[in-house]
Image (tube, rainbow, N blue to C red):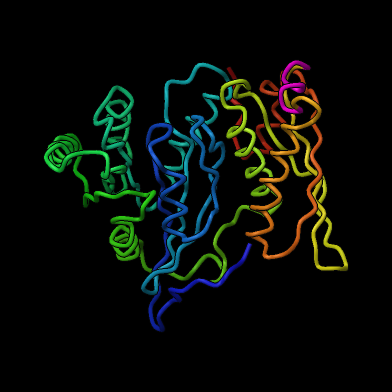
Amino acid sequence: MTAEIPNHAATGPTRCGFVALIGAPNVGKSTLVNALVGSKVTIVSRKVQTTRALIRGIVIEDGAQIILVDTPGIFTPKRRLDRAMVSTAWSGAHDADLVCVLLDAKAGIDDEADAILSKAETVAHKKILVLNKIDLVPREKLLALAKAANERLPFEDTFMISALSGDGVDDLRRTLARLVPPGPFHYPEDQMSDAPMRHLAAEITREKIYRHLHQELPYQSTVETDSWTERPDKSVRIEQTIFVERESQRKIVLGKGGATIKSIGAESRKEVAEILGQPVHLFLFVKVRENWGEDPDRYREMGLEFPKE
């Protein structure tokens, strides 16, 4: 996936590093990645736990390449898939050069945030506190929240932002560029993500499923891109399969007379075409794959480690 990036590296010494974003589900990590990069590289949904693997966004700022690791939301795991995602999130934090701890300014230090702050103490790297959704909270409450969080952990810096509006994001980007370690770039300057387009296209379709069916369809659904064909007329033909666990779920995704899947396909096709900058022909199929949440191969495809128990 490539595009023009406005902030090219300056001549001279470069900096490069991995920055992990950790926080509870729905705190705004994916929205922040997209705001920092300036383009859509991760899916954003009201449904919790939408980010399953470590999808990286890549930012170039002031001669530095910042590789953003958007970890799954950290929550109390109940199922095998939950445990895999939480384990992946913390491993992403431990492997990074810097860690941004995101808190929902409106929620404050609730039980989820409290548990994350406690566990973040075990991460040896520099940590930055990011209070998101500040447009929803009075300034006095923001200052009190920042003070309380900094009393819990020694943060390198504190930022108050709105990832949705972009307020405060530029300051955060400049600070990340300053704090990543010296070193050569890991990726070409015009690359925004290391997630292959096939994977991103599947994630976009999965986002549309959530948007249409977040109340009716359980979390156990996944999308795989089966084929990707560049056609002579410069368009792309994409075939994807939506996997659900039961026949009743398959009927929900299809909708009456195929209306639901038609809407999902139209929205996904439009967005993928915008990202690619070329026409897209998208064909969606829905299949039942019973108990896919217990299949180690599915976890590997999503970049997750299969928990033993």
Kindly indicate the quadrant of the structure image that contains residue 180: bottom left
The residue sitting at 79% across, 23% down in the picture is 288
The kind of secondary structure the magenta stretch mainly shows is: helix
The residue sitting at 15% across, 36% down in the picture is 141
- The one of 82 and 169 positioned closer to us in this rendering: 169
| Residue 233 drawn at (x, y percent) | 85, 68
Compared across the picture, whether 192 is left or right of 164 comes to right
Magenta-colored stretch includes residue 249: yes
Kindly indicate the quadrant of the structure image that contains residue 21: top left
Magenta-colored stretch includes residue 122: no
- Is 132 rendered above or below residue 211? below
| Residue 43 drawn at (x, y percent) | 55, 44
- The one of 90 and 274 positioned closer to us in this rendering: 274
- Is 58 rendered above or below residue 297? below
- The one of 268 and 246 positioned closer to us in this rendering: 268
Q: Which residues are magenta?
A: 247-254
| Residue 95 drawn at (x, y percent) | 44, 46
Instruction: Say which quadrant the N terminus sits in.
Output: bottom right
- Is 245 rendered above or below residue 304? above
| Residue 240 drawn at (x, y percent) | 78, 41
- Is 155 rendered above or below residue 306? below
Going by the picture, which residue comes out furthest to the bottom?
11
Kindly indicate the quadrant of the structure image that contains residue 247: top right
